[in-house]
Amino acid sequence: MTLDALLKEGESRLREAGVPDAALDARYLLMEVWEMSLAELLARRQRPLGVPKEAEGREPDGENGEKVRRYRELIGLRARRIPLQQILGVQEFMGLPFRVNEHVLIPRQDTEALVELVLKEQKGRRASLLDMCTGSGCIAISLMRLGDFCSAAAADVSRQALETAAENARLLLKGERMVRFVESDMLEAFGPEERFDVIVSNPPYIPTGVIEGLEPEVRDHEPRLALDGAEDGLKFYRILAEKGREHLAAGGYIYMEIGWDQAEPVTELFGEAGYRDVTVTRDMAGLNRVVRAVWPGKGEEEDHV
Ligand code: GLN
C-alpha cells in the first residue's frame, strides 16, 4: 500500500458521494493525518507504507495502520458531506487561520472584499468598531489585526459562536488588541448611549426558500441561524438600517456583506432610512458584495426631511 493508492481510494469514495473537489479533498485529509506538506506528499506518495494489504486478510497495524484507519474515517465524514473545513477545524481568512466548527459560518473569500474595503476607507482613523453577527469572529479579528481601530466589540445571538470567536481572538490577537464579545440579538444588548464609528456585518441573508437548494455542506452542516434571512432574505438589513441609526456616531459608517442580487433592495433600504453616500462594491468574482452607508447624524437627518 502507498499514499498514492490511498489517495485514489479516498478520491473515488468522495466522488461517489458527489463531493465536488474529490481529489483535492482526499489530498488535504491525507496531508492532515500524516502531518505532511504537499512537497513531502509528492516525494513520498509512491513509497510502500509497510502496511499489509487487506486482501491478505489482515487489518493494517503499527503507526501507519493507525493512520490508514484515521484517514478512512475522515474520508467517511467528508463522504457524508461534512464540510472539509469542519473536519480540519480551520479556514484561512485574510491570511489568518480561523478555528471553525458546526456553530459558525465558515469564513468565505467573498467576505474579504468587505474587510479590504473597511481597511481602505478607515485607515488612520482610530475608529471604534462593532461587528454584528460575528460568527467565527473573522471580520472583527482580522480588522483588529490589520487595521488601527481603537476598540472593537463583536456580537452574536449564538453563545456557541461567541465561544468560538473568543477562542479565535485568544489565538490570533495579542496584547492590547482585544475584542469585547457580546451576546445579543442584533443590537438589543447595546444601550441607547452606545455608539460606534464603524459597524460591520455579514448577517444571514439567504431567503428561506433558497436554502433547501444549496449544497449539502451548507444546507445540512452550517448553522441555519447564520444563513436564513427570512422570506425575502432582507430581514437583518431592515434591522441594521433602523437600529444602526441609534448606534452609529454622526458621520459613522456601516458596511454589510450582501447576496449578489441584493444591492438594489439594500441600497434602497438605507437610502430610505436617511443614510448618505450609499455605495456598492464588488468581490473578486465581480459580483456585488458589499453595501456601505454613512449615517449623517440625527440633526442633519431632520434638516433634510
Ligand atoms: N455567503 C454565504 C453563502 O452563500 C451566506 C452568508 C450569509 O448568509 N451571510 O453560503
Image: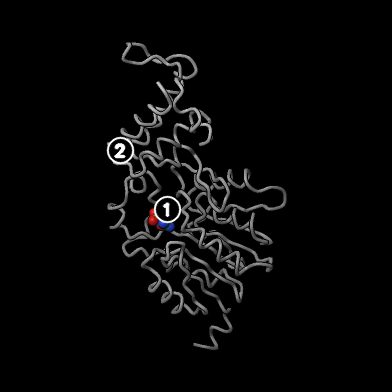
Measure how far apart labels 2 and 1 are at the Cα level.
Answer: 28 Å
Q: Please, what secondary structure does the residue beneath circle 1 have?
A: helix
Q: Residue at x 57, y 65 (%)?
A: 118
Q: Residue at x 72, y 48 (%)?
A: 175
Determine whether, in the image, residue 45 is placed left or right of residue 220: right
Q: Which residue extends farthest right?
A: 175
Measured as percent of width and height from the top left, residue 9 is found at 34, 29
Q: Disc 2 or disc 1, which is closer to the eye? A: 2
Measured as percent of width and height from the top left, residue 215 is found at 32, 48
Classify 214 as above or below 190. above
Q: Residue at x 40, y 42 (%)?
A: 83
Which numbered marker is on residue 78?
none
Determine whether, in the image, residue 137 is placed left or right of residue 21: right
Closer-to-camera residue (248/88): 88
Measured as percent of width and height from the top left, residue 248 is found at 58, 70
In the image, the residue with mark 1 has its CB under 8 Å from the nearest atom of ligand 1: yes
Say which residue label 1 marks. Answer: 226
Instruction: Say which label, 2 or 1, has the lower sequence index.
Output: 2
Say which residue label 2 marks. Answer: 15
Q: Are marks 2 and 1 in contact (CB under 8 Å)?
A: no
Residue type, numbered disc 1: Ala
Residue type, numbered disc 2: Arg
Q: Please, what secondary structure does the residue beneath circle 2 have?
A: helix
Crowding at mark 2 (Cα within 10 Å: few <14, some 14-19, many 20+): some
Q: Which quarter of the rendering shows the N terminus? A: top left
Q: Which residue extends farthest top?
A: 57
Measured as percent of width and height from the top left, residue 147 is found at 65, 60
